[in-house]
Image: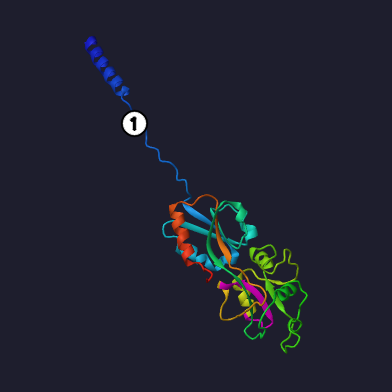
Amino acid sequence: MFFRRCGILFIALVLAAGCASEVIEPLVTVEAPTRPAVLQVGLSDSLSAFEPIFYECATDIGVLVETLPWRMLRNQPKDVFVVYGEGGKVLTEQVYQIGTSPLVMIVHPDNPVNAFSQNDLLRMYQGEITDWRDLSPLSSYGGEMAVWGYMPGSELQDAFAEEIFTANLQGAWNVAPDPAALVGQVAQDALAAGFVPVWAVTSSVRVVPLVDLTFEALPLLAIWEQMPDAAQQAWLVCVQSELPQAEE
């Protein structure tokens, strides 16, 4: 009986050893995605009117847009920044132009001024002209000017300074947070003037021609931290198709 039990135990040990010797296949490992599940977009507040486009084009990827002044936004960790003008172009080599639009000067529709010169604009924004009669002494239209612009150091204000050929524009103008707000201020004040990208113009204001200079079309830039993948490129193409382009 003892040997029978030992025989049974020996067979069990052999079977156990045989099972232990079988090769166990390792679990299949899945690499973590190299791209974020949600695309983090930093949008300059000068382009805040276009925020809905960024979400409408997000059909295949998730998108989260944060809108801030560029001077604050550029220090945030984002996958892509979208700005107006040349601001921030040195941050990365992955820069794509996705739109263009020039700046324009606007006034209230009741304002009869028919043109601005480069010198007019320089003197207005440096505070050398404070009354509409100073701009056109023979005009019966007068009153204290309400000159509007943006925060010093913003890409819009810097672009305007370059357009009127001054590197350091010093003055005391009223500050609007974005182009839409500036249009609203000029629309309700017959003595107001300011500049906006042409896409922001509405029927509530009037565009004033320039006599001795031309505002060039400025780029709308998408600045990527790394090369966008196929889904991100498709999203960017959609955004580009919806953004304003300067007329030829």
Provide residue 46's location: percent of width, then percent of height.
60, 66
128 horizontally vs 9: left or right = right
21 horizontally vs 100: left or right = left
Out of 155 and 146, give the one closest to the viewer. 155
Q: Is residue 81 above or below residue 107?
A: above
Provide residue 124's location: percent of width, then percent of height.
73, 75
- Mark 1 highlights which residue? 25
Q: Splitting the image into 4 quarters, where does residue 210 fall?
A: bottom right
Helix or strand or loop: what does disc 1 sit on?
loop
Out of 214 and 72, give the one closest to the viewer. 214
Q: Splitting the image into 4 quarters, where does residue 30 fall?
A: top left
7 horizontally vs 118: left or right = left
Q: Is residue 190 magenta?
A: yes
Q: Which residues, given as a range, are shown in magenta?
A: 187-198
Check disc 1: other Cα within 10 Å, few if <14, some if 14-19, many if 20+: few
Report the residue at 45% width, 45% height from top: 33
Which amino acid type is shown beneath numbered disc 1? Glu
Q: Splitting the image into 4 quarters, where does residue 151 fall?
A: bottom right
Q: Is residue 199 above or below residue 28?
A: below
- Display coloring: rainbow
Q: Residue furthest right?
A: 128
Q: Residue furthest bottom?
A: 140
Q: Is residue 38 above or below residue 139?
A: above
